[in-house]
Amino acid sequence: MPNRIKEEIARLKKERGAVILAHSYQPGIIQDIADFVGDSLELSRIAARESAELVVFCGVKFMAETAKLLSPESVVVLAAPDSDCSLAACMTGADLRMMKKKHPGASAVTYVNSTVDLKAETWACCTSANSVEVVNAAPSDEVIFGPDRNLGTWVATQTKKILHIWPGGCHAHSGADIRDLREKRAEWPDAEILVHPESPSVFLWEADEVLGTGGMIRHVEKSSSERFIIGTEEGMIYRLETLFPSRQFVAAGKIVCEDMGFTTPELVLKALESRDDGIEIPSELAEKAASAVRRMTEIG
Ligand code: 13P
């Protein structure tokens, strides 16, 4: 990255009381300029805690919206404004209303990878890091879970609750090919296999651990293994290599979220220069959606 951009980012960040947040799937160059790198849950919490005047979010739209819901006083700008999430697009608030009619006694738990309009219909949100705890805390024996069917199916194996699962999916994780994982395992038979629960079920059956991105970091920290096969978006490999330079990591397959790759240092600079209001949440949805996200942060 040119020094001029690096210096401008540092100067504007100070001048505008800004904080730069980046998800662990972001390109390495963006992880390096961020103040905090983390998983969906950690970044939501940091946005609320920091209450910065300006939050520059390097990730995809639902993440910046979640930060805005928890930190309504901050101006939250998504550095790459076109970066969206294919999974979030799989289910709407109207879809959930239809599910509620079908399962009137069930509470709704919605993965945070979702639109504001879906969150607003929800009892509580969850991330991959706390999905089981949130489902277990629901005030009913039956739970409507969406939009991710792979995460929902995995949660169903970890709880006594009855789940009604919406059949949505992340195009990047869902497209992973199990033959790639088996090939890597044959090359590195001693490696631990860590897989994100958005992956197809066959990946989860062959994993040593099923973990969200933050859980993967915490697991590597306490593991004595030297090598790891990582079943999630490939930006995570850079994150792990940065944190654990003496260990080895390889991707379990080609799991690439194109939208996560949209962010560039130039766009971060542009976000710091912007004077608009950033992410705006329709007022009729804001309080309901925020309460579903807050409930999640209170549970776990
Ligand atoms: P985490 O909740 O593990 O950060 O994952 C977010 C995500 O978008 C997975 O595709």
Image (spheres, helix red, strand yellow):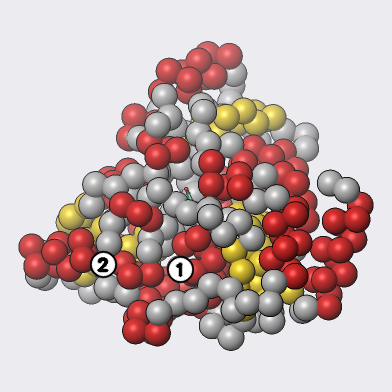
Q: Amino acid at mark 2?
A: Gly
The image quadrant that residue 10 belongs to is: bottom right
Q: Is 206 on the left or on the right of 79, as rendered?
A: left
Q: Residue at x 40, y 79 (%)?
A: 282
Q: Position of residue 199 (x, y in %)?
A: 40, 38
Query: Does dot 2 land on a helix, a strand or a loop?
Result: helix
For discs 2 and 1, the disc positioned in front in the rendered view: 2
User: Of the residues under marks 2 and 1, which one precedes in the sequence?
Assistant: 2
Q: Position of residue 166 (x, y in %)?
A: 23, 52
Q: Which of the two residues, 69 or 39, is positioned nearer the viewer here?
A: 69
> What residue sits right under mark 1 in the picture?
300
Q: What's the mark number on residue 29?
A: none
Q: Is 158 on the left or on the right of 22, as rendered?
A: left
The image quadrant that residue 261 belongs to is: top right
> What residue sits right under mark 2 in the picture?
93
| Label 1: few (<14), some (14–19) or many (≥20) C-alpha neighbours in 10 Å | some
Q: Amino acid at mark 1?
A: Gly
Q: Residue at x 38, y 36 (%)?
A: 174
Q: Which of the two residues, 132 or 114, is positioned nearer the viewer here?
A: 114
- Between the residue at mark 2 and the residue at mark 1, the CA separation in whole angstroms equals 24 Å
Locate the C terminus by quadrant. bottom left
Q: Position of residue 176 (x, y in %)?
A: 43, 29
